[in-house]
Image: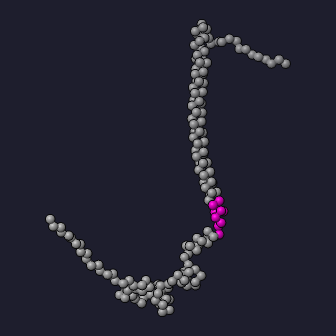
Amino acid sequence: MSSTSTTHIRPERRKRPARTPLNQAPPQVRSRQPVSQWMAETMADGVDTLPGWSDLAVGNERAMPLRANVSANAFLGQVPTVRFALYIVAVGLVLGFYVRHVYATQEVLSRVERAKKEHLRLELKVNRYHGVLDQMTGPAAIYERARALGLEEDIMYGPAITWQQPE
């Protein structure tokens, strides 16, 4: 048995072209047309580089301030952290009490509605009992019972009774 060895041949790697510095565009892209006002000023000065950190630093008259950060820092710089936290807690408490008030009001309203229904039910029951009492003590029932006892109905019920107040 013979052993055959296999060798792997790697293809040659191509070398990357050298990178151009960040402050220089490749020769085929480089143009002398200013893109912005800053670039126009820079090109007029004869400087063909990007600004450094010192150019962008705060306090430099050429530096462009970041407006969002300046306004946010100005606001946060004016409000102390403890007072701001207390305001947030106070607003949270007010909102919590408001939500609790809304739920409590809804609960009271549902209780009032239940009480109204109960009141209406009891009122109807009282009216029904008054109707039954009126049927039991009405003239029709009394005449019926009087006939059952043997009394007879007559045109004259008897002499009129008059009452005179003593002097």
Q: Is residue 44 visible?
A: no
> Residue at horizontal 59%, vertical 39%?
111
Quadrant of residue 54 within the rendered picture:
bottom right
Query: Looking at this rendering, what residue extends furthest in the right direction?
Result: 167
Q: Is residue 64 above or below residue 98?
A: below
Quadrant of residue 3 within the rendered picture:
bottom left
Q: Is residue 17 visible?
A: yes
Most common SS among magenta residues: helix
> Residue at horizontal 56%, vertical 81%?
57
Q: Nearer the viewer, residue 153 or 3?
A: 3
Q: Quadrant of the N terminus?
A: bottom left
> Residue at horizontal 37%, vertical 88%?
27
> Residue at horizontal 29%, vertical 78%?
13
Quadrant of residue 22 within the rendered picture:
bottom left
Q: Position of residue 147 (x, y in %)?
A: 58, 10
Look at the image and give the residue range highlighted in magenta.
Answer: 78-87
Q: Quadrant of the C terminus?
A: top right
Q: Nearer the viewer, residue 110 or 9?
A: 9
Q: Position of residue 113 (x, y in %)?
A: 57, 39
Magenta highlight on residue 9: no
Query: Looking at this rendering, what residue extends furthest in the left direction?
Result: 1
Residue 76 horizontal side relative to residue 38, left or right: right
Q: Is residue 100 above or below residue 63?
A: above
Q: Nearer the viewer, residue 39 or 158?
A: 39
